[in-house]
Image (cartoon, grey):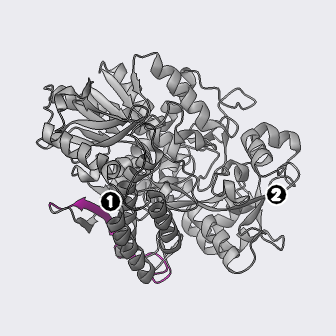
Amino acid sequence: MALDVSEMQTIEHDVIIVGAGGAGLRAAIECSRLGLDTGIVCKSLLGKAHTVMAEGGAAAALGNVDPRDNWKIHFRDTMRGGKFLNQWRMAELHAKQAPDRVRELEEWGAVFDRTKEGKIAQRNFGGHRYPRLAHVGDRTGLELIRTLQDKGVHTGISVHMECTMIGLLKDGDRVSGLVGLWKEAGRFVVFKAKTIIFATGGFGKAWRITSNSWEYTGDGQTVAYEAGAEMMDMEFTQFHPTGMVWPPSVAGILVTEGVRGEGGILKNQAGDRFMFDYIPEAFASETADTVEEAQRWLDGDDGSRRPPELLTRDVVARAIYNEVKEGRGSDHGGAYLDVASRRSPEYIKKKLPAMYHQFKELAEVDITKQPMEVGPTFHYAMGGIRVDADSQMTNVPGLFACGECAAGLHGANRLGGNSLSDLLVFGRLAGVGAKAFIDANPDTPKIDEDQVKALVKRAIAPLNRESGGNPYVIHDKLRDSNTSLVGIWRDEEGLTKGIDAIHALRKEAETVKAYGSSQYNPGWAEAMDLNALLTVSEMVATAARLRQESRGAHSRVDFLGEREEWGQYNIVIKRNDDGSMNVERVARGDNPEELAKIGFATLEELEGTNG
């Protein structure tokens, strides 16, 4: 019997936001504030957002702990951490606006830790020159979500929970809505909208060891790509240096950088503090102009000592990886993170309460007495949907993106803490951009019934087959392949094998079978997720093969070190008319003169210049 679209449930809003993490909630608050009828569609329950895993804090140059900090130094740190592959304008907007967004959270009820003077407390974090992360113990993301949800529900936002996005609908070139699936009922729904904002997060579930939860399957990137949006910087995938290693049931769960920010140090099996062996070249290139300046930073002769454990995440992750590879790893294949010998039990329980309970309950380790076993875990995607810096709109009219699913701010490597301020700054700007687009295009776009039917037909195919492959097996094969071939270290041969494996798995996925009914069927959900998981994996591997250098979080054993010519290009991916993937280098253009002066300036030139 043919599908009758007119009988399908239809919900209409001015703007639909897909994703209810920090970026989605902040965008929704702004849209509602600007008078738009706003709806949020989330894959899971409201409050079950990956933002809660961001424990360390939100980076903003408030200058509460060290008054020498200012937006220019934050901008400089961000550009240097990203190996100058960041979008200059996005880094500028972020550094300038982050302090206001954090203060705004405080006005909305966020309860930050305090300095003795009663100001918002800030802690050290990797790659940041001064203490910059506004925090709530080690539960900052949870407090951020609590505050944004409380603000959001009181502004009249409609929330549509446990609804999986199937695909976008378009009226000509412009987006007109999307098709979703209610998990509980197993029924499809059409959402009509004048604009759509994606805040769908990342895609870590395509790798074996990850801090990401089950929702992170690359839905937003894949759906946007299939609708014609461009992707950028997909080769830059961040492996957080400290995920839990043992027991296997918790492998990959995040151990906040705040442990190191509060004094924790890394040791190998012999008890050596090995990060000192990785300082001379890496530290100078990441965070200082010269080795001498880096050493002054380490020694703390300017009153703001930084341990080598707070190098940028790509450096620390590779250091742990190398220690394990050379036989100096911990008992279970990681490194030891020791805060117990550095801080009192009372201090640890006050500053790191979530970590204390996490290790106590999941690993039977008392971190006030014992070291933690940690190792690299896939954590964050620097690349994603290409957007305009000021409006956050993609090249598809009416489609916006913000937060982790969008590219541009972080370049080749994200600094810890920049993710929370990123979602606050660009979530708001996406809302402002959506309002401006609607003002310029007030008409409601039409829904194409044939597009709805095609999306539903593709989604329901695994249920209708009499037999086929197991979607969980295919997902497992993909995670193993990506982990071994598209991991921390990469080379031409391995990446080619990884791409071939993805193509073979896509063939298997075309005939996958989901057993059972449509209501609350995890096998069906897994089968539908495969397309996105395979698509983002192919993007990462193909872009990584094209970039023949090592820069930031992208490391090639066959092309060690940065190559100047590659710093002039971003890799952009788009879908060809025949469905094939087009991957090409796109010139970045000339550096903006005034911003380049800041990015390449010395610290002495920037301190006290917060104008």
Q: Is residue 247 above or below residue 194?
A: below
Position of the N terminus by quadrant: top left
Q: Please give left or right for residue 145 compared with residue 445 in the image.
A: right
The reply to whether residue 495 is in sight is yes
* Residue visible at 82% across and 57% down in the picture: 371
- The numbered dot on residue 591 is 1
- Give the percent coordinates (x, y) of residue 208: 55, 62
* Cα separation between marks 2 and 1: 45 Å
Q: Nearer the viewer, residue 102 or 589?
A: 102
Q: Position of residue 29 (x, y in %)?
A: 41, 25
Graded by Cα atoms within 10 Å as few (under 14), some (14 to 19) or many (20 or more), the crowding at tag 2 reads: many
Which amino acid type is shown beneath numbered disc 1? Answer: Asn
Q: Which mark is residue 371?
A: 2
Residue neighbourhood size for the residue with mark 1, other residues' Cα within 10 Å, grouped as few (<14), some (14–19), many (≥20): few
Residue 288 seen in this snapshot: no
Q: Quadrant of the C terminus?
A: top left
Instruction: Let me know if residue 373 is in the magenta part.
Output: no
Q: What is the span of residues highlighted in magenta in the rendered image?
A: 557-577
17 sits to left or right of 112: left
Given contact means CB atoms under 8 Å apart, are the residues at marks 2 and 1 in contact?
no
